[in-house]
Image: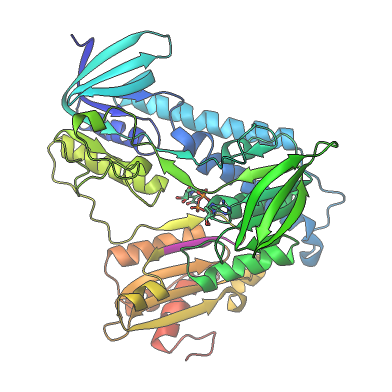
Amino acid sequence: MADKTYDAIVIGGGPGGYPCSIRLGQLKQKVLCIEKDEVGGVCLNWGCVPSKAIIATSHTFEKVKRGTTFGLVVDNPRIDANKLQDWKEGIVKKLTGGVRSLFKTNGVDLLYGDARVTGPKTVSVKTREGTTEVIQATKAIVIASGATTIEIPSFKFDGKQIIGAKEAVSLREIPKRMLIIGGGIIGMELGGAYQHLGSDVTIVEALPTVLTGVDPDIAAVVERLYVKRGAKILKGAKALGYERQQDGSIAVRIDVGGKTDTIETDVVLVAVGMRPNGAGLGLEELGVKIDRGFVPTDATGQTNVPGIYAVGDCSSLPMLAHKATKEGEVVAEVIAGQKAAKDWVAMPAAIFTDPEIATAGLGEQQAKEKGIEIRIGKFPFSALGRAMSVNETDGFIKVVADKKTHALLGVHIVGPGATDLISEGTLALEMHAFLEDVGLTVHPHPTLGEGMMEASQNALGHAIHVMNR
Ligand code: NAI
């Protein structure tokens, strides 16, 4: 016998599950969201938002330190890591409290506990209080269980010196030295932040490039600046293991091109990726297809078993909060009987390195691999008055378009404000815009957004402030 019955049960309260629950509530569905940890998931509690708070402070600190260039003289600026943490935790509390109150106002019930799917419409929950509740869904179960940080066996987390991203955004002391295993998104974002905060940073990346997946000319701008600021970036390198030293430091053995080197550090941050939490929830037993931990779905978010849906990191790549949210909304609408599907043109990505990176649509290489004849437009921030006046001139905006039709295919930005600027590019792609649409739109002066207009004009051969090809 079920203890309670709902129209829909959502397992997981992260950026996939909580918007899904709210949308279900808005659509007058009786909904229960089950969360085993804290609403907001990794993103709000230990990922996207807290890391961005730390990154923002690190960026301001770095600007203040080099402020004499632009007439800002501050004697002995320093970081209070405790205050930084308190401030960050305040933001997290505000946001997670906000989710709980949105649940209330939208009629979403919240249950804290560990959920297991025990039937096509049944979920069993081991609650925080230690009781077991059996809950019935009349319409649907949504899996929004996220992903977990991958551990390397030879670098088991100890929570203090061998840590993952979760601990790295909670440090109450800035380490003198930080060695990061993995030069992907987390490694480069947090590496950049701790470098600004004063750590001596080494990044160990197994592949020949850092930030694999973004266009190489974009990644090169960030890598060059990190190295210029003093970071050591070892590529084609593998961390083999470590020994604790008598003085408390950690000596990490690294293989670089067949040669073993040892690097001493105070903290090792392991950032080698996330694995999806699709397995072990009872889904396999019900015949739900699981593919390497992911729970695949069709365009409506439904798995191969009718009535069971999946959204976010546990379902497919890319593991991005905004993709999870969009999927959550789509699935809620489908469950409520509306016509909805995952039909976006471009899924933007925003990477908070310094300078920032943002991309939407096809990269230069990707377009070529698809056999599309393209034209490229590029505009450097060094030619933009606004970028000069905020003293952030590294990087560029690149647009990729169809050579003949001028249809926009991709926008790629490295530089100041990239993560905000990309929304214009994403909207342009979603609207099937042409270079002329962006290039002929009046962009206000002096703003960073002018770079979008100039890059599009450059692709057409008539940008004003750069030489055109
Ligand atoms: P990632 O997949 O971006 O990067 C992991 C890197 O570690 C790769 O470059 C890989 O080659 C390297 N690697 C793997 N094993 C290694 C080893 N033994 N030694 C040296 N290098 C090794 O994963 P990351 O950075 O952990 O982030 C996880 C996911 O979280 C991302 O894929 C992304 O989807 C999401 N994320 C997104 C953010 C954003 O959009 N701003 C911010 C943070 C995370």
Q: Closest to the observer: 176 or 203?
A: 203
Q: Closest to the observer: 377 or 306?
A: 306
Total numbered badges shown on the rendered structure:
0
How would you classify the magenta stretch by its main secondary structure? strand
Magenta-highlighted residues: 355-359
Percent across and percent down for residue 73 are 83, 57
> Which residue extends farthest front?
258
The answer to whether residue 174 is visible is no
Quarter assignment of residue 219? bottom right
The residue sitting at 23% across, 51% down in the picture is: 342
The stretch drawn in magenta includes residue 50:
no
Picture layout, residue 155 above or below residue 204: above
Percent across and percent down for residue 381 are 58, 73
Q: Closest to the observer: 55 or 262?
A: 262
Percent across and percent down for residue 457 are 42, 82
The residue sitting at 50% across, 42% down in the picture is: 150
Picture layout, residue 191 above or below residue 105: below
Q: Is residue 378 left or right of residue 255?
A: left
Q: Which colour scheme is used?
A: rainbow
Q: In this view, does 71 lie to the left or right of 436?
A: right
The answer to whether residue 317 is visible is yes
Q: Quick one: quadrant of the N terminus?
A: top left
Percent across and percent down for residue 124 are 28, 17
Q: In this view, does 145 lie to the left or right of 67?
A: left
Q: In this view, does 275 lie to the left or right of 81?
A: left
The residue sitting at 57% across, 62% down in the picture is: 210
Picture layout, residue 354 above or below residue 339: below
